[in-house]
Amino acid sequence: MACYTVGLVVGGAVSSAIFYLLGSLWRPNLVTVGILALVLGVIRVFRPNTVAIGGFKVPRNWTAWGVQRFLGAFGVLLGMGVVTTTPSPTMLVIVVWMLHLHSFPLILVTFEAFVAARLLTTAAVLYSQWAAAQDVVLSADAFVDKIARVPRLEAACSIILGLILLI
């Protein structure tokens, strides 16, 4: 778990640096961020299970590197937040907003908060698996059922953000 955790933190830091540099090339205005927040928030309302870009999966043959290296690499890619399947289309709003803000400390805090959330969900699933002495897939499915309302809350936050930015 330590290699996975370090990988997550490093991945978040790498994405922070990349998006800070991208913000030097393009800084969207607040209207762009607001419209994107509204549109993707509405999409999230009507299609709560839709995920955004990505789709890269860490190849299983990377396990040949050994458990520690595999978990570290997996953590880095997951911590980057946009290499693997992005958890939500509204994460794109956060990314575009970070480009607008163009503040490395804020970008870093944002990505590391994402990392903390990824780590928390992993820990919750692993604890659930250990406590119930069941298969990790069953524990993960049970966790997904428990957080089924989160996409609607996320959509509402995105729509409210969009309205605030456009008013």
Image (spheres, helix red, strand yellow):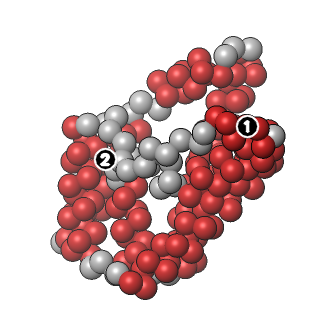
Towards the viewer: 147 or 6: 6
| Residue 88 in picture, x, y percent from top left | 39, 47
Q: Examine the rendering and report whether any part of residue 127 can be seen.
A: yes
Question: Which quadrant of the structure image shows residue 23?
Answer: bottom left
In this rendering, is residue 124 above or below 106?
A: above
SS for dot 1: helix
| Residue 8 in picture, x, y percent from top left | 66, 54
Label 2 is placed on what type of residue?
Ala
Q: Earlier in the sequence, mark 1 or mark 2?
A: 1
Residue 26 as seen in the image, left or right of residue 143: left
Question: Which quadrant of the structure image shows residue 87?
Answer: top left
Mark 1 residue crowding within 10 angstroms, few (<14) / some (14–19) / many (20+): few
Residue at x 47%, y 55% (from the top left corner) = 82
Label 1 is placed on what type of residue?
Thr
The C terminus, quarter of image: bottom left
Q: CA distance from mark 1 to mark 2?
A: 37 Å
**Residue pointed to by mark 1:** 63
Can you name the residue that lies furthest to the bottom here? 24
Residue at x 55%, y 62% (from the top left corner) = 111
Residue 91 as seen in the image, left or right of residue 106: left
Q: Nearer the viewer, mark 1 or mark 2?
A: 1
Residue at x 53%, y 41% (from the top left corner) = 57
In this rendering, is residue 92 above or below 74?
A: below
Mark 2 residue crowding within 10 angstroms, few (<14) / some (14–19) / many (20+): many
| Residue 154 in picture, x, y percent from top left | 37, 47
Residue at x 36%, y 59% (from the top left corner) = 92
The N terminus, quarter of image: top right
Label annotation for residue 43: none
Residue 152 as seen in the image, left or right of residue 79: left
**Residue pointed to by mark 2:** 155
